Amino acid sequence: MAAEAKKRKVDKEDRRFQERWKLQYFFTESRNNCVCLICKQSVDVAKEFNVKRHYQTTHANAYDKFTGSDRAEKVKQLEAGLASQQRLFTRARDSIENSTKASYEVAMLIAKHGKPFTEGEFVKDCVMKMVDNICPEKQQEFANMCLARNTVARRIEEISADVKRQPVMKAQTHLTLPSYLFFCEEWMLN
């Protein structure tokens, strides 16, 4: 049999972004990717050939006119635009995560107090009235929180399944029988 040829792995070549590509090709590094500051596209492999080809085929005609300090200023301007765009997405993701977490916490309180699942809608109405008077600028964030009956029911089911799964997971990490019994007893008391 013929010996198999070694396949070249691009990820093992340890290619990295070069700072000089910022001024030469309007590229920057974002989350370990080479991203074009102009069109926000990323190249698959951080090689100068790929970065240069992208710049020359898509942006060279419009951006070759910038030289020296004008070029550096344009790079700063494009970097600021990319950073503000990334902050916008981060804020939106954080807002969604916070409203989901709050929804779970309200569902947990509804379950602990034995209230009907429809109470979530009542709680949201109350919260919205408070937000209108206390901090109207946050109104949209609170409006995005879903406390509909079906959502509250689903969240309570997920919390219940997680609570049932926790003692088993704890017991698997502590393989002795006495500790398993201790965790089961602790779970039953809560």
Image (cartoon, helix red, strand yellow):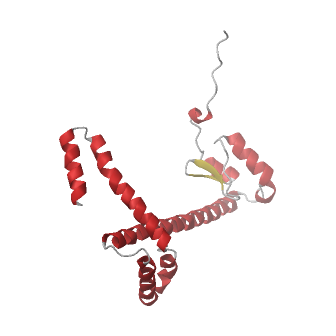
Q: Is residue 129 above or below residue 157?
A: below
State which quadrant residue 174 falls in.
top left
Pick whichever, 130 or 174, lies toward us. Answer: 174
Decide if residue 98 is in sight here: no
* Side (left or right) of 62 relative to 32: right
For the point 43% across and 64% down, the residue is 155
Q: Quadrant of the N terminus?
A: top right
Q: Position of residue 108 (x, y in %)?
A: 36, 68
Residue, far top: 1
Pick whichever, 40 or 26, lies toward us. Answer: 40
Q: Quadrant of the C terminus?
A: bottom left
For the point 24% across and 50% down, the residue is 184
Q: Is residue 16 above or below residue 12?
A: below
Decide if residue 142 is in sight here: yes
Q: How many marks?
A: 0
Q: Position of residue 101 (x, y in %)?
A: 42, 66
For the point 80% across and 49% down, the residue is 57
